[in-house]
Amino acid sequence: MSTYRFFQDHSIGGLYYSAGSTASTRDVGGTLPTGWVPTPACDPLDTAAVNAFYAAGPKAVILQPNTLSFQVRPPATYWKATPMPGNGCTSYSLTGLGAALSPIFA
């Protein structure tokens, strides 16, 4: 039961989702595979999507050439990296809907 907004074009399971479009998983009548692991180039829009996004862990967004990503609203929920002084580790915290979840350290 997850819904996402894509801020880059995606091709998933033979279907094409353009930047700015939204899609849900099949378990709620959508077109995304149930249990789909979200990419960092999407914005989770509900609790189930945030939990899947969190479980996927922090990853860098690699901008695709020739996409419409520059024309869509940036995500509300994304990973924010914070270097930890003195120990070389980085703390990754979610913003937006995932702000209450614990940070991940790497």
Image (spheres, rainbow, N blue to C red):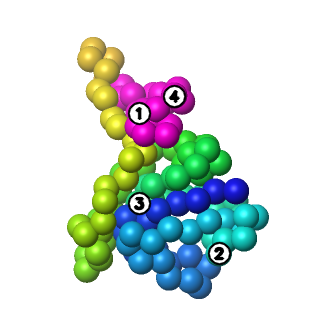
- Mark seen at residue 31: 2
- Say if mark 4 contacts mark 3, CB within 8 Å: no
Q: Which residue is mark 1?
A: 92
Question: Label 2, label 1: how many angstroms apart (C-alpha)?
Answer: 30 Å
Label ID, residue 67: none
Q: Nearer the viewer, residue 13 or 26?
A: 26
Amino acid at circle 4: Ala
Q: Quadrant of residue 78?
A: top left
Task: Determine the residue located farthest toward the top in the rendered image.
Answer: 86
- The CA span between labels 3 and 1 is 16 Å
Helix, strand or loop at label 1? It is strand
**Quarter of the figure with residue 50:** top right
68 lies above or below 61: below
Read off the magenta span: 89-106
Determine contact: label 3, label 1, CB under 8 Å. Answer: no
Label 4 SS: loop
User: What amino acid is found at the position of numbered circle 2 in the picture?
Assistant: Thr
Tell me, yes or no, whether the highlighted magenta stretch contains residue 100: yes
Q: Alpha-carbon neighbours of circle 2 within 10 Å: few (<14), some, or many (≥20)?
A: some
Q: Secondary structure at mark 2?
A: loop
- Do residues under tags 1 and 4 come within 8 Å of each other at their CB atoms? no
Q: Quadrant of the C terminus?
A: top left
Pointer 4 residue? 100
33 up-or-down from 60: above or below: below
Measured in 3D between alpha carbons, the distance from the residue under mark 2 to the one under mark 3, in whole angstroms, is: 18 Å
